Image (tube, grey):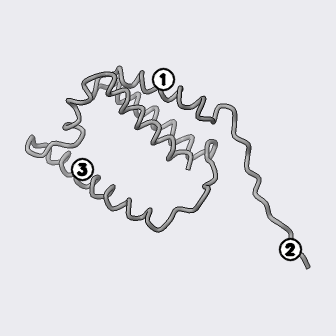
Amino acid sequence: MEQPRTEVAVDAPRGWDRAVVTMPVLAFLSLIGGQLPSYTTRANVYTICLGGSMVWLGLSGRVRRPLLAPLGPGTAWWLLPIGIFGVFEGSTFLLGTPEYPTFSRLADPLLEDELVRSAAYFAWLTTFWALVRR
């Protein structure tokens, strides 16, 4: 007896969920974020609101795309440098001494320019958007 085929229907991409639409929106949002001075309440609230809305979109499943291929075993090796970076950044933040500055303090001279800060913000937004869609 023949088994019934189970097919998973993949939704067609929404009109707004294309790179032609999302990249200019992310660029506009990063230009706004790049104009805000570092370590201010406005900048922190803006970043938390953008990050929170992306987390909400990711958890709701509205923007998820199916994976083309499963992640390979080498993917776990990326967790090691990320973990080491997190431990190092957290420990230097907790120490708070000038001898051991955090990476964010080391990047401050580069991020003083609003255009560079907007470009870094855009890189952060596009990376986070790619993670949200997985």
Q: Secondary structure at mark 2?
A: loop
Please give the residue where the numbered disc 2 appears in the rendered image.
3
Q: CA distance from mark 2 to mark 1?
A: 51 Å
For residue 40, what is the image quadrant? top left
What type is the residue that disc 3 sits on?
A: Gly
Is residue 30 depicted above or below 59 in this figure? above
Instruction: Identify the residue shown where x is 27% and y is 29%.
Output: 111
What type is the residue that disc 1 sits on?
A: Phe
User: Residue 6 vs residue 95: left or right?
Assistant: right
Check whether the beta carbons of the residues at disc 3 and disc 2 lie within 8 A of each other.
no
Q: CA distance from mark 3 to mark 2?
A: 54 Å
The image position of residue 61, as x and y in percent, is 62, 46
What type is the residue that disc 2 sits on?
A: Gln
Count residues near mark 3 (Cα–Cα under 10 Å), then give few for <14, some for 14-19, many for 20+. Answer: few
For residue 107, what is the image quadrant? top left
Residue 90, which numbered label? 3
